[in-house]
Amino acid sequence: MYHPPVRTLGGLCTTLVAIAWLSMGLAAQRPAAPAPPPLPQLVHTCPMHPDVVEARPGTCPLCKMNLVGARLDASWMCPVHAVVIEPASGSCRLCGRALVPVTVSLAWTCRGDVNAEHLEPGLCQDGSPRITKRTLRPHGNHNPQHGGQFFMAPDNWHHLEGTYPRPGQFRLHLYDDYARALDAPKLQAITGRLVTEERYDPATRTTTEVRSAALRLSRDGTTLEAAPAHKSWPVRATLKIVLKKGEPEHRFDFTFPAPTVDPLASKTATGTTRGSQTSRRPAVPPAPGATASTPAIAVPDAAPGPADASASPTSPTPSTIPEILEALRARHAEIGLLVQKGDFAAVWVPAFQAKDLALALEVHLGHLLAAQRATAEPALFRLVQGAWRLDAVGDGGNREEIETAYRAFGDALTDLAAGFGDR
């Protein structure tokens, strides 16, 4: 009778070791799984003012509410179908249009409880991985959708884009806080006019409108239009508009160096979109000289070149007090050049750089004498507040408010330098 060989414990161990070595060899031959991309930095933002984003916990400088944690990420959204938000650039899966850059809140959720959001990836209670959720933030899409100039209204809800596609034709596109176009009934409730010439009387300190054109609903009901008397490029015009009945009139100052081109309507021969817009448009050429109603602002002689609006709002911070103050003066001059040219939407870049520079001086306050600190500390607070103010009014597009904020920022900088003994 045949007896199978007896497998001893030693032989079994030898076999298991051989299998283990074989498995390790096969694993070494397989390419390693790619490491997951790093998570966006955890920041703290205001529930009421989403433009307020800080690196550390604290309170909102505008409303004093406690900041909440968030992970902000750059994503890409369809300009027509806002439900299409992708982690990378490309085309909309619904209409084929080029996606535009937006800012989203990145969170993770579970299938059974989509309202419960986590700031970290991980596992759900059933063991399944959490689902990535990208949510467009209020004011997260400040892209000009039709090649024009994009501003935010003082009510923090309406957003508007002015275009000037041909001589004598001004078009106004209006959106909500998520950059969704308003429908015809909402547009009909809005009244206003486009002023192309004003005369200022210094004796009475009053401004008289010389040339203006009323806004009217377009034939297709998608925009408001005006037919101003056109002279030549560049065009400098002021929109005066009432967004809701009974509310005050708002002012927005536009500068058009050349005819605007709608990237969604203009196609090249290959079918790709021409003139695609970024979230912050590049600087425009200088506007003509300021009139009496819009006085020129003083820009320091040592002003650097214009800001690159596509650049990051953060930059390396100098380590010494003189270097920080010199960098602040450079940002101050940079903002002045942008305001002079009417490129208000680009002011946020040097303004945020100035905010970070100012906060870097905070640790040096303790080294000052009591008299110096009494000057420097409130000036530092005013400068940080002034940077936020410049960002806010820059999005608002009111030249008078922007110039006022710029002068206040400059005064705070002068006092700050005096407090630190650097004049």
Image: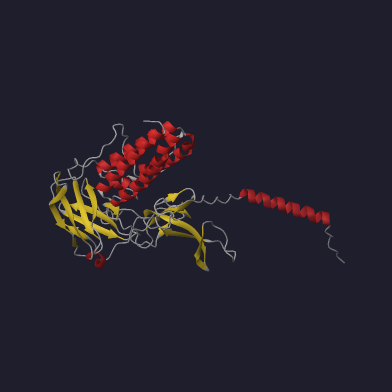
Residue at image location 54% in from the left, 57% down from the top: 121
Q: Residue furthest right?
A: 1
Q: Quadrant of the N terminus?
A: bottom right
Please tell me whether residue 232 is drawn above or below residue 262 in the rendered image: above
Q: Is residue 227 visible?
A: no
Residue 167: x and y, percent? 15, 51
In this view, which residue lies farthest toward the front? Answer: 371
How far from the left and from the top, in percent, is residue 93? 39, 61
Would you say 200 lies left or right of 173 here? left
Q: Nearer the viewer, residue 6 or 352?
A: 352
State the quadrant of the C terminus: top left
Q: Which residue is drawn at the image coordinates 20% and 49% (left, top)? A: 259
> In the figure, residue 181 lies in which quadrant?
bottom left
Residue nearest the viewer, comparing 252 with 225: 252
Residue 301 appears anywhere in the view: yes
Check the image and tell me how it is coloured: secondary structure
Vertical position of residue 39 compared to residue 359: above or below: below
Instruction: Find residue 395 and report its horizontal and vertical position in percent.
Output: 31, 51
Closest to the observer, 414 or 313: 414
Residue 277 position, x and y percent, is: 31, 50
How many numbered discs, if any? 0
Q: Residue placed at 83% from the left, 54% from the top?
A: 10
Image-quadrant location for residue 346: top left
